[in-house]
Structure formats: C-alpha cells, structure tokens
Image (cartoon, grey):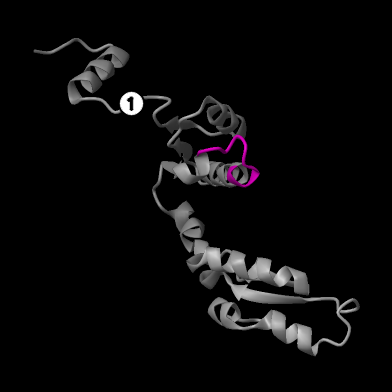
Amino acid sequence: INMPLDILANLALGDMLKELRPDPAAWPGLIVDLHEKTVMHDIPIAIEVAKSLEAHKVKLAIDDFGNGYNMVAKAEALPFVEFKIGRAFVTDCSTDKTKSATCKNVIDLAHKFGGSAIAVGIERGSDVLTLAGLGCDGGQGYLLGQPMPETRFLSLLRLRANLPKTG
C-alpha cells in the first residue's frame, strides 16, 4: 500500500486492523510504502508511526529511495575536490554503526568522484582512528586544531611552508 506519511500518521490504522482482520495470529502483516521525500521531511513522525504499528504486523518501506539524493548523483560532474562529512555523522562514528556506515559511504563517493573525504567536527581520538580505518583523507575539529588569531595562523603557515618572517 502506498500512502503519504501525514495521512498514515493521522489514520487509526492499528484500531482498524483490530476490528477488521479475521484472525490476528494467521495474518501475515502489511507493508506500507512511504515516499522518501515525506519521510525525510519528518523522520521523528515516521519513527513514531513505525513503532506504533509494529504490534499490528505493519512495517514501513521507503519508496523511491535515493531520489532525495540527486545532488549526490550529479556530484561527479561538479568540480569538487573535497567532500566534507558533517559533524552529525563524525561524532561517535567509532561507536555508532549507522554513523560509521554513512561516513564510509561518503568517503567511497568522494574517492569515486576523484575527490578527498574530510571529516568535520572531530573531537575524539577514537573517531579519528575509525575514520582513518574507513579511508578518510583528512579532518578538522577541536581535537586537531583550535580556532586561532590571524597572527598565530600566519606564523604556523610560515613555519610549515618554511617561509621567512616578514615585518
């Protein structure tokens, strides 16, 4: 069954199933397809609906998955040299399998498109190790370097580039 998320969220489907299905033990269940776009706009409601319907053997499927990522599909044609992995995925990627898998996907895409993958918001050593193991090319964040005044930045830049100081 295809159904918009907002309708499913407001539909008393659980109550309807209690009333209408003849033998709950023999009922194989139901899968409701929700369009990816509606799920992405309201993930918390989709999660709430999925949990509320579990007891009734109703499961949710994401229809047209990937259509919301058209930018990713077009990335190969754009002149990007780096793909930055957002802090939301980087933080705790060493302990969260979903975040780790997302980081790996971005890293693989960056490499496929000839770019580098850079992790943003790194604050823990364990996340650095995980990202390095996944093939991440670099990172930024408080663990690696604090914000600094321009004079300090220029001094470090000269030191690393082996440039002479100027007045």
Q: Is residue 30 above or below residue 82?
A: below
Indicate the position of residue 76 as horizontal and vertical percent values: 48, 52
Query: For the view shown, which residue lies furthest in the right direction?
Result: 26
- Which one is nearer the viewer's eye here, 102 or 162? 102
Quadrant where the C terminus lies? top left
Q: Amino acid at mark 1?
A: Gln
The question of residue 26 being in magenta is answered with no
- What kind of element bears circle 1? loop
Q: How many marks?
A: 1
> What residue is at 46 percent from the left and 59 percent from the top?
71
> What residue is at 80 percent from the left and 76 percent from the top?
29
**Which segment is the magenta one?**
91-99
Specify the principal SS of the magenta part.
loop
Indicate the position of residue 68 as horizontal and vertical percent values: 51, 65
Relative to 138, 153 lies left or right: left
Quadrant where the N terminus lies? bottom right
Q: Is residue 105 above or below residue 1?
A: above
Q: Is residue 113 above or below residue 21?
A: above
Does residue 68 appear in the picture of this structure?
yes
Picture quadrant of residue 27: bottom right
> What residue is at 61 percent from the left and 81 percent from the top?
3
Relative to 141, 28 lies left or right: right
How many residues crowd around disc 1 within 10 Å: few (fewer than 14), some, or many (20 or more)? few
Quickly name the residue at label 1: 146
Relative to 4, 30 lies left or right: right
Indicate the position of residue 143 as horizontal and vertical percent values: 43, 26
Does residue 85 appear in the picture of this structure?
no
Picture quadrant of residue 63: bottom right
Q: Is residue 113 above or below residue 31?
A: above
Indicate the position of residue 47 as horizontal and vertical percent values: 60, 64
- Which one is nearer the viewer's eye here, 60 or 163? 60
The question of residue 93 being in magenta is answered with yes
